[in-house]
Image (spheres, helix red, strand yellow):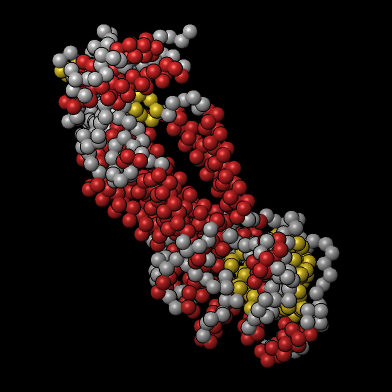
Amino acid sequence: MPATSRAPLVVELGTGAPLISGSAAVGAALVLGGVFTSTDGQLPGWADPLNLVLTACLYLGPLAAGAAALQVSLQQASGILELAGTTPRGKASAIRLGWLAIASWQSLALLVLCALILVRSDLSGGFSPAMLLLPLQAALLVSACTAAGVAVARLWQHHLAAPAVAVALFAILYLTSDPADRLRVIYPEIHYQIYLEPNPGLLSSTALGLAFATVVAWTGLAVRRSRLRALGFVIAGALLASSVVTRIHTDERPVAVRRPPHSATCYRKHDVRLCTWPFPSRSLEQSLSRLDRMHRVLAMYDDAAPTDFFEVGLVSPERAAAYDMPRHDDLVQDGTEEAMALIPVPTCSRLAVTRAYGELVRWLVVESSRELGHSASAATSAGWVVQRLSAVRASCR
Amino acid sequence: MLTTPAVSKPVDDAEQGFVLRDLTYDYRRLRAPRRRGRPALGGVSARASSSAVALLGPNGAGKSTLFRILSTSTSASGGSFAVAGYDSAGSAGSLAEYRRRIGVVPQRFRAPHGYTCREVLAYVAWLRQVPRAAVADNIAEALVLTGLAEYGERKIGTLSGGTLQRVALAQALVSRPRLLLLDEPTVGLDPAQRESFLANLGEVRRRGTTTLLATHLVEDVAVFAHEVVVLNEGRCAYAGRLASFAETADGQPVPGAAISAAYQRIIETGADG
């Protein structure tokens, strides 16, 4: 009886570029998840750990793109693609098989990373199904990176294609991240602040758009007669996909306010009461002190200055006295968040009103940073403050 | 000497051999300025009716271009061909079906070094859409036919050039093709490896597979072919029986020297000779 043969995908998974790059990706996931990921300051629950997985794509995505480009380059150099072009399945199938092997390994790396971070995190809190979209989004991002690697290697047949696409993607992901936190390896909140979670509708339509763009790009690459035409297909696919997504979700917020994992816990200092999520971070004391100091400054001019504050998530970010409490102790806080919680949120969007709001916030930050009782401007600026408070409280006429 | 037939209507049955109708291939279509000049194929028409045809010609004659057109890795700028029940003009068969019926041995076969011989064959079987139930049998048969029965589990990276070329033949046979296309398969092989390869090829031909061998080595033609098509400067300089070509008696072994002399005469005379 003739020996049986392993399926091509199984062989592809276990040899060459997919195996080497896949092992490297899993190794990177182990290091990122086990060593470089800080779980300090995370809220209980699944959100932040899963957010970390998405953040890790900064490193895993470019690696995946480079691996995919290398795989296609090797296929081209080995003549396998030329041979595949004489078969009923064609070149596209050979490329797709290689891409699938690379993407499978990268997904495994994400799974390892996800499991590792979850094991190291506190999962006692609540959980929202929308949060599952975070690792799904990570997998989509990595798959899109591999597709980009394939496209670049097909269009630019050069031995530098693989490192070039990896470096370019890293640069894009790095430069589009928050400038203040670029140098931190992995940290929460880069994509979603703690009180936010993905909008399932928008994410689903984005995924559909990405899939559509991929199909169009694949078609272009499969039938390509010239690089220019193939590039045209890729650009057309991307434009069509983005227009579809935009059309479906115009004015839709990219995120939704996260459901709190538990009921609120409230803390008091003098006249000020702050209700936060459970297990507040070490910055609670500083936050309460800043709120208390600012409240005392504002109360000199405004009898209606709020005393009860609620962390965003317990209330929506737009509500009065909603406070976005900083969670990271190592970030310098200038008091803007506290001032924004104290100053009434304007209901009118006129330029004069929003300008008055901004001026009040800046004034309160500066004024509260001086010692109480020694404010040089307090006596003279009473009219200025009251005038602006009236402006932000007034409704549009 | 030119015996190219005038083909005026599509041939719907080219079960053995092939028909070429005014095939052209122009690099200008590819926007490749460095390769502009005379077209790679300037209207090649020829007919062959046997199961062992050699495509002969010097370097740059257009053999590889014609080979790539017949193997469908590129398409002609103009003209058409009919082979193995398929007519590229559209009058017979589908492209996918044709691709299932052919086996291709490229000029320099390479495969991923980490693959075993069996895995390479399985991969090509998948590309050629060989039914899953037949894959194992086809692989075993191809390995035996090419003398590679003991090499099934050997990694590609460990094989010599001659053995690798036999793997190239085996992968082309894994779909049990009706038409086998070989592009200069013996280039780079030492005499013993060449002899072994041509012996394997002879066995394939005896099993009824139509075989087209593109080569510039007249020694290979003497061992292998019944018919010969000579290309020179992108045109067909001769198409017909090998015995007629070498001006020897039909049915007798054709000496390599006679083929070589005839070949030189045609090349020197020019494409219109």
As drawn, A141 above or below B41: above
As drawn, A256 above or below A319: below
Q: Is residue A345 visible?
A: yes
Left or right, A387 with respect to A121, comes to right
Q: Quadrant of the N terminus of chain A?
A: bottom left
- Residue depicted at x 55% and y 84%: B195
Expressed as whole percent of the image width and height from the top left, the position of residue B171 reads 52, 67
Q: How many marks?
A: 0
Expressed as whole percent of the image width and height from the top left, the position of residue A222 reads 58, 52
- Residue depicted at x 43% and y 75%: B159
- Residue depicted at x 50% and y 36%: A208
Q: Nearer the viewer, residue B99 or A66?
A: A66
Expressed as whole percent of the image width and height from the top left, the position of residue A47 reads 29, 32
As drawn, B44 above or below B247: above
Left or right, A104 with respect to A397, comes to left
Q: Nearer the viewer, residue A91 or B200?
A: A91
Expressed as whole percent of the image width and height from the top left, the position of residue A269 reads 15, 18
Q: Is residue A324 visible?
A: no
Q: Nearer the viewer, residue A283 or B73?
A: A283
Q: Nearer the viewer, residue A236 or B247?
A: A236
- Residue depicted at x 26% and y 29%: A334
Left or right, A390 with respect to A38, comes to right
Left or right, B122 with respect to A260, comes to right
